[in-house]
Image (spheres, grey):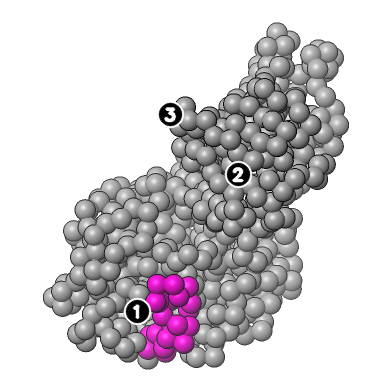
């Protein structure tokens, strides 16, 4: 049984929380998820706000708003979709910047709250959240030393140089500027309250301003705002107190704080010092603390696939031992069963999510309905983050609708005429296209020449550092296709004769790529193998390996070999290896590969292969002999042999994914979605 929509009166800032929670709880009782995850779907009261469940959407920058900080229809639609899927939980909008200069602004499309003129737009977001029966939370965020996105400088407690790739001089804040910043937090909190938000949240994480003051790495001040940990907490405490004065005693104030900076190499806080910050935040008056770990400048990743699910819960346990206020936590905690257990054991009080609700905004709703197989889990590819750091709107590799929630043209609607659709290729592009076409009502047949679905994802998921999570999207697409009525034909090679026999109305070519060995002297030698041979375990290599080609497939194969102790040298024509690999991962992969003693030759190619070495033609034509027992080839070209024949036999032919041009996973899935809509 589906739950009925529960909405509050539009624009009503005086919500009857008891009534709202009572309505949600009545609905929960009728759905299996309340029995499967009883701890997630029980209410919690924080100050005047009563919340129907223990699920929170974490603040997520999206770059959907105007460059001067005004809210757009795109952002309202995006937030509404997350609020709708939360089935009564907490929906946090993106962190807002609070100063007119933009010193605290970290993202080009970040929402602003430095003037009353922004209240109407912020209220549109709060109203959308309330209309879906969720609790509205606004986050106040000064980005500190990673702020000033449109300025030539950034600010912080001290002028300690950045370690980020995009360097900016850090301007040390004066006491007057510190006091102004504190006042700006209070004024923004007041505006949040006027815009009908139920909760005010303060950001103190990942290298933003409050964390800059807290950390011994970035705070070298000798006045009352620096020195020992208590003094380094002073700015945070004064911000909390100012926000409390602005909103009154009944409004919940949340804060996100780092429990483990992972800045040991730079002289950052110890975990014990971090717990002091928690205690002082609690003493200053916060009502809930979100536990985080890591900094943008840390050498240690916290959200990549090599971090096991639930790994960071030990920091939540430590927080629970040090403070009495409720604790929430995100960071590699994707599964409802894991979160429910953490709540049951008293490790956390609220399950917080960011990327999982980008990938599937209806994750909580599906958990409540007991439809776990329908959940489209985040694969931790971090495309969303990469887009942000390139000053672009976020998107999602597995959810093509992100950023298009407002646009009716992106919604799946019944087809005017049912067609027979032949999809050739069972990779992500073909699967996504088949799914959308079937959901529109077409008769869809998908053909795959191998006995396994997934295309290049099959190989990518064989990496040694959690890459098996990548295959999750293939499993989800397969299940959804089966539910939508797609007929699968595995181990079937499509020929022009088969197309002529089946007589489809539409042919979609999603045949992907094939690995090829370019013809050079020695390319026919037995020590030359394909990257797919390595990843499928068909061949063994010698100790010295040259990887010919530095795109994603080659990087994964090189990483696989490096874990076996092989010395891997990468030869790539590109300006750097892994240009198609997410920035969150490539530096870590290359670090691991480099630990075996391998090298990278950029702007280079192989000129010849010999029995125990290769000749590399480097930049400026320099020829370099490199020892090599085995040469692994990771060079791809599109499979286009069927395209022209299909066009002669069928009136509607589409080419998608890598068959069109070799690109990335998100390009394949988005291609499939868009073409599926057009059929």
Along the horizontal axis of the image, is 487 left or right of 43? Answer: right
Residue receiving disc 2: 569
Against 272, residue 15 (above or below) is above
User: Sequence-wise, which precedes: disc 1 or disc 2?
Assistant: 1
Q: Is residue 391 visible?
A: yes
The quadrant of the picture occupied by the C terminus is top right
Disc 3 on helix, strand or loop?
A: helix
Q: In which quadrant will I find the N terminus? A: bottom right
Assess whether mark 1 and mark 3 are in contact (beta carbons under 8 angstroms). no
User: What residue is disc 1 on?
Assistant: 216
Q: Secondary structure at mark 1?
A: loop
Q: Could you say which is closer to the camera, residue 32 or residue 274?
A: 274
Residue 608 at x, y percent in the picture: 63, 27
Verify whether residue 161 appears in magenta.
no
Q: Nearer the viewer, mark 1 or mark 2?
A: 2
Task: Name which residue lies at 54% across and 69% down.
Answer: 330
* Direction left: furthest residue: 176
Are the residues flagged by discs 1 and 2 in contact, CB closer than 8 Å?
no
Q: CA distance from mark 2 to mark 3?
A: 19 Å
Kindly identify which residue carries mark 3. 620
The quarter of the displayed image where residue 96 is located:
bottom left
| Magenta-highlighted residues | 255-281
> Tag 2, which secondary structure?
strand
Instruction: Reply above or below: 367 against 474.
Output: below
Say whether disc 2 or disc 3 marks the residue closer to the N-terminus.
Answer: 2
Looking at the picture, how far across and down is residue 627, in whole percent?
A: 64, 40
Give me the disc on residue 162: none
**Which residue is pictured at 21% across the width and 53% down the height?**
152
In the image shown, does 355 or 374 lie closer to the viewer?
355
């Amino acid at each position: 049984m589906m739950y009925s929509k529960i909405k509050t009166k539009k624009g009503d800032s005086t919500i009857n929380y008891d009534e709202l929670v009572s309505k949600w709880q009545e609905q929960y009782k009728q759905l299996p998820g309340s029995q499967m995850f009883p701890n997630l779907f029980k209410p919690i009261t924080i100050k005047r706000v009563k919340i129907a469940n223990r699920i929170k959407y974490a603040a997520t920058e999206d770059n959907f708003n105007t460059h001067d900080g005004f809210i757009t229809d795109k952002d309202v639609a995006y937030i509404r979709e997350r609020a709708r899927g939360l089935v009564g939980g907490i929906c946090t909008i993106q962190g807002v910047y609070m100063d007119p200069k933009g010193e605290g602004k970290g993202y080009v499309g970040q929402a602003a709250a430095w003037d009353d003129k922004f209240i109407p737009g912020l209220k549109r977001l709060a109203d959308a959240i309330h209309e879906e029966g969720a609790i509205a939370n606004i986050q106040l965020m000064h980005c500190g030393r990673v702020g000033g996105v449109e300025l030539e400088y950034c600010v912080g407690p001290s002028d300690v140089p950045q370690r980020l790739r995009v360097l900016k001089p850090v301007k040390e804040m004066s006491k007057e500027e510190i006091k102004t910043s504190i006042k700006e937090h209070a004024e923004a909190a007041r505006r949040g309250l006027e815009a009908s938000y139920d909760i005010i949240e303060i950001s103190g994480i990942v290298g933003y301003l409050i964390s800059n003051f807290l950390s011994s790495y970035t705070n070298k001040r000798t006045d009352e705002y620096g020195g020992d940990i208590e003094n380094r907490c002073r700015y945070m405490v004064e911000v909390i107190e100012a926000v409390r004065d602005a909103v009154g005693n009944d409004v919940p104030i949340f804060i996100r704080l780092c429990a483990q900076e992972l800045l040991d190499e730079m002289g950052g806080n110890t975990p014990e010092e971090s717990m002091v910050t928690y205690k002082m935040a609690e003493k200053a008056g916060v009502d809930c603390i979100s536990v985080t770990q890591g900094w943008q400048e840390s050498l240690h990743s916290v959200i990549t696939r090599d971090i096991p699910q639930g790994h960071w819960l030990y920091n939540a346990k430590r927080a629970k031992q040090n403070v009495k206020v409720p604790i929430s936590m995100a960071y590699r905690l994707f599964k409802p069963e894991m979160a429910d257990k953490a709540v049951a054991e008293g490790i956390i009080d609220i399950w917080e999510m960011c990327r999982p609700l980008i990938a599937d905004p209806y994750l909580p709703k599906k958990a409540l309905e007991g439809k776990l197989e329908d959940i489209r889990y985040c694969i931790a590819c971090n495309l969303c983050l990469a887009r942000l750091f390139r000053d672009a709107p976020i998107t999602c590799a597995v959810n093509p609708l992100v950023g298009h929630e407002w646009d009716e043209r992106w919604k799946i609607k019944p087809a005017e005429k049912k067609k027979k659709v032949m999809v050739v290729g069972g990779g992500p592009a073909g699967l996504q296209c088949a799914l959308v076409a079937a959901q529109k009502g077409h008769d869809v047949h998908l053909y795959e020449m191998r006995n396994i679905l997934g295309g290049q994802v099959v190989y990518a998921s064989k990496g040694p550092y959690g890459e098996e999570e990548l295959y999750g999207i293939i499993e989800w697409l397969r299940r959804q296709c089966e539910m939508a009525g797609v007929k699968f034909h595995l181990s079937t090679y499509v020929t022009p004769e088969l197309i002529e026999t089946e007589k489809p109305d539409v042919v979609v070519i999603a045949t992907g790529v094939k690995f090829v060995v370019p013809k050079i002297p020695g390319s026919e030698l037995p020590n030359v193998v394909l990257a797919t041979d390595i990843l499928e375990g068909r061949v063994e290599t010698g100790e010295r390996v040259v990887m010919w080609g530095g795109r994603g497939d080659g990087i994964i194969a090189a990483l696989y070999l490096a874990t076996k102790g092989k010395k891997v040298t990468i030869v790539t024509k590109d300006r750097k290896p892994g240009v198609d690999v997410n920035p969150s991962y490539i530096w870590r992969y290359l670090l691991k590969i480099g630990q075996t003693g391998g090298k990278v030759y950029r702007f280079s190619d192989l000129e010849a292969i010999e029995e125990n070495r290769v000749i590399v033609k480097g930049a400026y034509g320099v020829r370099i002999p490199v020892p090599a027992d085995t040469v692994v080839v990771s060079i791809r070209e599109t499979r286009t042999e069927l395209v022209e024949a299909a066009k002669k036999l069928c009136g509607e032919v589409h080419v998608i994914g890598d068959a069109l041009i070799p690109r990335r996973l998100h390009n394949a899935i988005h291609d499939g979605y868009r073409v599926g809509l057009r059929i």
